[in-house]
Amino acid sequence: MSPPSPIAGARLLFSLDPAVSYLNHGSYGAVPISVQRTQQRLRDETEANPLKFFAQGLHDRVAHTRRHLAAFLGADPERSALVPNTTAAVSLVLQSVRPASGDEILLTDHAYGAVALAVRRQCRRVGATARTVAVPLGAPEAEIVSRIRGALRPGRTKLLIVDQLTSATATALPVGRIVAAAREHDIPVLVDAAHAPGMLPVDVAAIGADFWVGNLHKWAFAPRGTALLSVAPGWPRRMDPLVVSWEQDSGFPQSVEFQGTLDYTSWLSAPAGLFVLRTLGLDEVRAHNAALAAYGQRVVGEALGLAPADLPEPGAAAVSMRIVPLPAGVATTFPEARALRQHIADKLAVETAINAWGGRGWLRLSGQVYNRPDEYERLAERLPPLLQGLR
């Protein structure tokens, strides 16, 4: 398997430390230099006259940004709101859905850890139940939909939460078909699309979920703290902000977006990130990143003695994260996974993601335009002896 040709000049767009192989774009993203400068100009504008920045025209600027980002994602801007991140949006939705005693909220076993924590906390508060449906890694779409449909309990399931692209297992789920299955029983669905914007082709309206939220600070080159929450008709008037502000009576989306003295510069800079993405070529970036992640998965997997059949496929062509199973007994718990990630960073100067899922440790590799094939090749050469030294 050959690596993709690099996108000319792309590496120079970022300020990443050249002494570190940054193979973990999926966790926190990386902001292009031009977008950093756009945000700094907005911060300078804020500090030149804070009152003017917040009191004159900020609402219109945020609304304009929201329309721009919503159009990119195929969402209705009037039923969308800018939020800090997917995790914040999940808590907002949980509060707005208002589960009660006897209700349940259904997750898959691929759900992001912080989302599962938020669900369990909300359920404890009201006497509801958090329930998990197992979805085998590598299961075909029909089986995924069947398993989730079979786990729904009409009259009890208050909300279904599914990932468009799972974090720990880098698997694209057929969210459109899942939403349709839940719709048969009038069960609301929240799609956690934290990794989707910029990486995957997205049409929020076509997915048809009651709630869809995605981060733009991962794969769409926005500054951190930028996400879009879109809700279906009938839900805007029911959205209950986590914090009450002066815009409470304005209703959604303003009641959600305006929380006093937030740093709005990350949102206002987000269109500059999309400009970088489009300038590089959206289709070219997606194809490059997916192919590079697949190359990295293959060379590291081979170095660990794994056959191609042992390496999970992501379920969609544009997925630019891939996972590699670690040797049995390595990083099987969250603390062990966190410690191994730090050990790899310290000893090999490589940033990766290590996750514990399904009783096994998994190495997750990302592919981004600033990465080079030799970074994965060096990891493949040096990782096996490092893991051997842990035994």
Image (tube, rainbow, N blue to C red):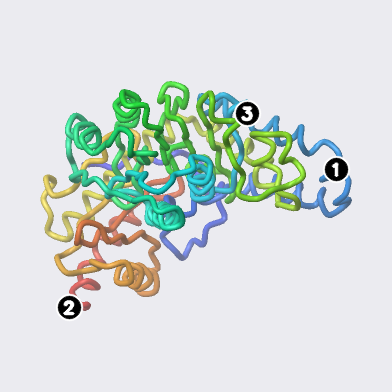
Q: Secondary structure at mark 3?
A: helix
Residue type beneath disc 1? Ala
Does residue 75 appear anywhere in the picture?
Answer: yes
Would you identify the image quadrant in which residue 54 lies? top right
Residue 15 screen position, x and y as percent = 57, 55
Is residue 244 left or right of 312 when viewed as pictured? right
Would you identify the image quadrant in which residue 336 lies? bottom left
Tell me: residue 376, above or below residue 107. Answer: below
Q: Which mark is residue 391?
A: 2
User: Can you tell which of label 2 and label 1 is closer to the viewer?
Assistant: 1
Relative depth, front residue between 243 and 324: 243
Tell me: residue 381, above or below residue 297. Answer: below
Which quadrant of the rendered structure holds the C terminus?
Answer: bottom left
Tell me the CA gap for discs 2 and 1.
60 Å
Residue 229 screen position, x and y as percent = 54, 37
Residue 60 screen position, x and y as percent = 76, 32
Q: Are marks 3 and 1 in contact (CB under 8 Å)?
A: no
Residue type beneath disc 3? His
Q: Residue at x 23, y 39 (%)?
A: 151
Which mark is first along the chain, 1 or 2?
A: 1
Q: Are marks 2 and 3 in contact (CB under 8 Å)?
A: no
Residue 199 screen position, x and y as percent = 42, 37
Tell me the CA gap for discs 3 and 1.
22 Å
Q: Which mark is residue 55?
A: 1
Q: Which residue is mark 3?
A: 68
